[in-house]
Image (tube, grey):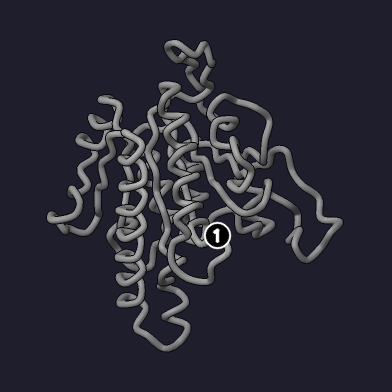
Amino acid sequence: MRSPHSATAPDTGTQLKYRRVLLKLSGEALLGRSSYGIDTKVLQRIASESKEVHDLGCELAIVIGGGNIFRGIAGAGKGMDRATADYMGMLATVINALALQDALERLGVKTRVMSAIAMQQVAEPYIRRRAVRHLEKGRIVIFAAGTGNPFFTTDTAASLRAVEIGAQIILKATTVDGVYDRDPKQFPNARKFSEISYIECLNRNLKVMDSTAISLCMDNRLPILVFDLRKPGNIRRAVTGESIGTIVH
């Protein structure tokens, strides 16, 4: 596990445990109580909490999925060509990224969307050095279109981008408050882990992230913090090192 570098944010005195992080959001996180699309209230809350940690001095990059609009693997399961379905899913992530960018900029936060698929009218092309430079200049960077390749999930894209930009941790925001030995929604007596190893996640098939994403984090000693996005203030708690969720390392 990497040794996180602490940094004290100006004017607040708040101690950051992680100076540079990658926040992984699922597209479903934007649904709220809807069955499709984007709940603007949820979007505004995520933007507000992202601004809060940004104001603390945290360099924040975000990867967002597209499951609230279209999931490639679901399309493939209904008979579509898998590659075509995955490209459609990547375009859905661009829609979500633009929506989040708009919500952040309405709060006065300078934001850049970088797409792995070229679409220069709406997003910058992904270039690693440029992404790092944006972070150094105090901009929130949203990575869209996954890795730009079919057959890879946005979890894998999050792991890849986190390693490329030198993030100290992946913050995996979900609808549960950590990693359990089985589905807590189906089994009330499921046991929650405070920490767990990459290997155990893979061996138990715990679905923290897909196996490619976890393996990439394991190879690069990049920790993953799994926590509940629905609880207000949890993103701040994560970057300041409070004990929440489950750490995978």
Residue furthest to the right in view is 189
The three-letter amino acid code for the residue at tag 1 is Gly
Quadrant of the image occupied by residue 116: bottom left
For the C terminus, the quadrant is: top right
Horizontal arrangement in the rendering, residue 78 relative to residue 208 (left or right): left
Badge 1: few (under 14), some or many (20 or more) residues near its Cα, within 10 Å?
some
Task: Name the secondary structure under disc 1.
Answer: loop
Instruction: Judge whether 180 appears above or below 18 on screen.
Output: below
Residue 248 point in image, percent of width and height: 61, 41
Instruction: Judge whether 21 appears above or below 205 on screen.
Output: above
Residue 214 point in image, percent of width and height: 52, 49
For the N terminus, the quadrant is: top right
Horizontal arrangement in the rendering, residue 6 relative to residue 189 (left or right): left
User: Residue at 41% of width from left, 29% of height from top?
Assistant: 54
Residue 6 point in image, percent of width and height: 50, 16
Q: Which residue is mark 1?
A: 32
Q: Nearer the viewer, residue 35 or 212?
A: 35
